């Protein structure tokens, strides 16, 4: 065994799992190996052509960080493990760098003396589904050395292993090794590190049992906007309006200008509506007289009888999202606007949270509107300017930039009275937070017995003047969404 880079652990003996393992101990016969265990690796070698710092010692350090790997470019490059003594070999475990993105080809051989090699796997291939250990069964073989010959991967000639493990019986058996599954990247998982799958409908990544969906369409032709109930939403998606992003696993809302609208609006939406009843249709969505049902919530400043009828008191909605696209064509007063979160009351809206990016600007603005009962909207700018001809906001939010918002209503004691206070904040990836001044809604008309609240989230377009729905639309992707209430 010449012309190799060699990395050793220990000398003529190793302390394994609290016992001294002599290097010359006799191996168990392969055919008698019934209980398979991980085997210690004492050294790793290659031909010295590994890339940069990615040397052979990294394949047996039990570290599944992608930077702890062996990498060598070229068909026929080899890496060899020394098990310290002859073992009864039964399986080989391999964790591949970018194993969730590509399949890697390889051959496996074993040897007792490092000179004569016995083929165990010829033309092997990884599954291309995960970066965790993949275990490959091999013929029962007495071996001290285990050698992998890389044949490149389906995208390049690189051979890259995060970990290489041996399983069988013998004096080198050790306690169970990590298989990397706790930190593995999988082909079915988000490529952004989020705990989101990319191969399932949104309801399998997000708890949508307490939401229904309004679409910008009339797919059944009944002359009304389509709604997907909280029960039917489980497992439902449509690549035109509401689906899982195939890269991030996020929940995508897409709204086309000129889409079908609800009876109370002239704007189309792909938007969730909070349904606190969670599929219990014995609870009505709303009462005709405006008194609350257990499907909705009220302010803590509302009369006690209203609180007793409601499904919750006060509330907080938190979301993490990115606005992917806004409209660019249409009237100056409407272009580029999309509502990404709301509190809706019986008839009015205590808050509509807007993102707006004008066609000539690099960044977008964030602001909200508060609508008191029977009054004109009051606008509060948080980031940038909401104007129709606003300059590019230097501190604005770009398309596809991930950020979070929180919309909260809390009852707060002031001057001996309980006041419904609206709190709105925006958090960015750099850790910065923009908080609007708390808004006192005591005089807004919502602390009454015949009104109620529910949260909404998604892409509610505010432009109905674009004539190119094929390429001019609003799209928002959510990565987290939750709504909570005091009871």
Image (cartoon, grey):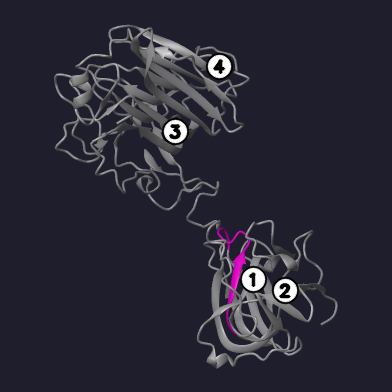
Q: Is 162 left or right of 463, judged from the image as shown? A: right
Please say if 24 is above or below 270. below
- Which numbered disc flags the more N-terminal residue, 3 or 4? 3
Which of the 4 image quadrants contains residue 64? bottom right
How busy is the neighbourhood of tag 3: few (under 14 within 10 Å), some, or many (20 plus)?
Answer: many
The residue that label 3 is drawn on is 319
Q: Residue at x 40, y 26 (%)?
A: 341
Q: Are marks 4 and 2 in contact (CB under 8 Å)?
A: no
Which label sits in the foreground, 3 or 4? Answer: 3
Report whether residue 281 is seen.
yes
Rendered-image quadrant of the N terminus? bottom right
Stretch in magenta: 89-102
Q: Are marks 1 and 2 in contact (CB under 8 Å)?
A: yes
The residue that label 2 is drawn on is 79
- Which numbered disc flags the more N-terminal residue, 1 or 2? 2
Which label sits in the foreground, 1 or 4? Answer: 1
Q: Are marks 3 and 4 in contact (CB under 8 Å)?
A: no
The residue that label 4 is drawn on is 384
- Which numbered disc flags the more N-terminal residue, 3 or 2? 2
- Which numbered disc flags the more N-terminal residue, 3 or 1? 1
Q: Are marks 3 and 2 in contact (CB under 8 Å)?
A: no
Q: Secondary structure at mark 3?
A: strand
Residue closest to the eye, 308 or 82: 308
Q: What is the C-alpha distance between the residues marked 3 and 1?
A: 41 Å
Label number found at residue 164: 1
């Amino acid at each position: 065994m010449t012309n190799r880079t060699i990395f050793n652990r220990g000398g003529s003996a190793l302390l394994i799992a609290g016992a001294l393992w002599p290097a010359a101990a006799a191996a168990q016969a392969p055919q008698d190996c019934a209980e398979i265990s991980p085997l210690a690796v004492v050294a790793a070698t290659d031909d010295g052509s590994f890339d940069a710092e990615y040397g052979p010692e990294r394949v047996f350090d039990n570290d599944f960080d992608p930077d702890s790997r062996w990498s060598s470019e070229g068909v026929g490059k080899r890496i060899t493990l020394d098990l310290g003594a002859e073992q009864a070999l039964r399986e080989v475990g391999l964790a591949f760098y970018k194993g969730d993105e590509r399949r890697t080809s390889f051959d496996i051989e074993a040897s007792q003396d490092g000179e004569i090699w016995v083929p165990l796997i010829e033309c092997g291939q990884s599954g291309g589904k995960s970066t965790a250990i993949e275990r490959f069964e091999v013929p029962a073989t007495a071996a001290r050395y285990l050698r992998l010959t890389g044949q490149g991967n389906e995208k390049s000639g690189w051979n890259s292993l995060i970990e290489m493990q041996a399983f069988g019986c013998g004096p080198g058996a050790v306690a169970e090794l990590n298989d990397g599954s706790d930190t593995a990247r999988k082909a079915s998982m988000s490529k952004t590190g989020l705990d989101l799958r990319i191969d399932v409908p949104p309801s399998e990544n997000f708890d949508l049992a307490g939401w229904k969906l309004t679409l910008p369409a009339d797919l059944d032709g009944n002359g009304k906007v389509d709604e997907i109930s909280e029960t039917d939403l489980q497992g439902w998606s449509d690549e035109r309006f509401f689906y899982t992003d195939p890269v991030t696993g996020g929940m995508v809302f897409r709204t086309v200008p000129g889409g079908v609208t609800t009876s109370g609006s002239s704007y189309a939406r792909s938007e969730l509506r909070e349904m606190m009843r969670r599929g219990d249709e014995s609870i009505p969505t709303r009462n005709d007289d405006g008194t609350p049902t257990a499907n909705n919530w009220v302010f803590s400043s509302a009369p006690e009888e209203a609180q007793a009828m409601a499904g919750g008191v006060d509330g907080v909605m938190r979301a993490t999202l990115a606005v992917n696209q806004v409209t660019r064509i249409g009237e100056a007063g409407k272009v580029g606007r999309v509502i990404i979160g709301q509190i809706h009351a019986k008839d009015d809206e205590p808050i509509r949270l807007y993102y707006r990016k004008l066609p000539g600007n690099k960044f977008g603005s964030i602001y909200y509107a508060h609508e008191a009962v029977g009054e004109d909207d009051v606008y509060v700018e948080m980031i940038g300017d909401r104007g129709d001809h606003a300059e590019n906001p230097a501190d604005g939010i770009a398309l596809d930039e991930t950020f979070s918002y929180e919309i909260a209503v809390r009852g707060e004691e002031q001057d001996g009275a309980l006041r419904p206070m609206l709190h709105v904040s925006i958090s960015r990836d750099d850790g910065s937070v923009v908080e609007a001044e708390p808004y006192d809604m005591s005089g807004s008309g919502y602390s009454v017995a015949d009104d109620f609240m529910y949260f909404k989230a998604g892409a509610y377009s505010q432009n109905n003047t674009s004539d190119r729905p094929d390429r001019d639309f609003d799209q928002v992707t959510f990565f987290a969404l939750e709504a909570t209430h005091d009871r």
